[in-house]
Image: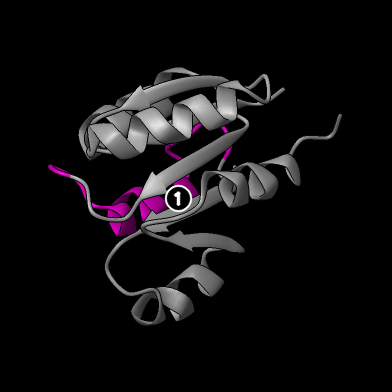
Amino acid sequence: MLRILLAEDDTNHATLARQALEGDGHLITTAPDGRAALDALARQAFDLLLLDMRLPNVDGREIIDRVRGGLARRADIPIVVLTGYGLRQHLDFFSRHGIQDFLAKPYDCDELATIIRTYDPH
């Protein structure tokens, strides 16, 4: 079981991801925008951040920069990125920030669950 922060502004995507991951026993906290995600990361410990790159208020790049810079309780928290806006433009950025897993929207919930399972030590 992982404690996952799901930062996603699209309610349909958030609902599908939540259902898929809760079905595997994970505890999901949702953040509808970048500011809410940063607030949650600063006050609570999570095992994984599931992050949409395009969020209102604060975008995914800034969130990643701030998390890796020490904002979150764990600067090394695994981050799995979800994006509907071209992955290739972000690949160097992901590599520099230790992001190994990402999915292009629309994604398959089974594929998401499979990726998340690789982070669960149990």
In the depicted structure, whether residue 77 falls above or below residue 89: above
Q: Position of residue 2 (x, y in %)?
A: 66, 26
Q: Residue at x 27, y 68 (%)?
A: 85
Q: Residue at x 36, y 58 (%)?
A: 105
* Quarter the C terminus occupies: top right
Q: Position of residue 29 (x, y in %)?
A: 44, 20
* Quarter the N terminus occupies: top right
Q: Nearer the viewer, residue 115 or 95?
A: 115
Q: Quadrant of residue 41?
A: top left
Task: Decide if residue 106 is on the left or right side of residue 114.
Answer: left
User: Per the image, is 57 magenta?
Assistant: yes
Task: Decide if residue 78 is on the left or right side of residue 36.
Answer: right
Q: Which residues are magenta?
A: 56-74
Task: Decide if residue 26 is on the left or right side of residue 105.
Answer: right
Give the class, few, some or many, for how many residues have Cα within 10 Å of label 1's Cα (few <14, many ≥20): few
Residue 76 visible to the viewer? no
**Which residue, as the protein is rendered here, is positioned at the far right?**
122
Determine whether the residue tagged by mark 1 lies in a helix, strand or loop. loop
Q: Nearer the viewer, residue 26 or 65?
A: 26
Residue that mark 1 sits on: 69
Q: Residue at x 25, y 31 (%)?
A: 11
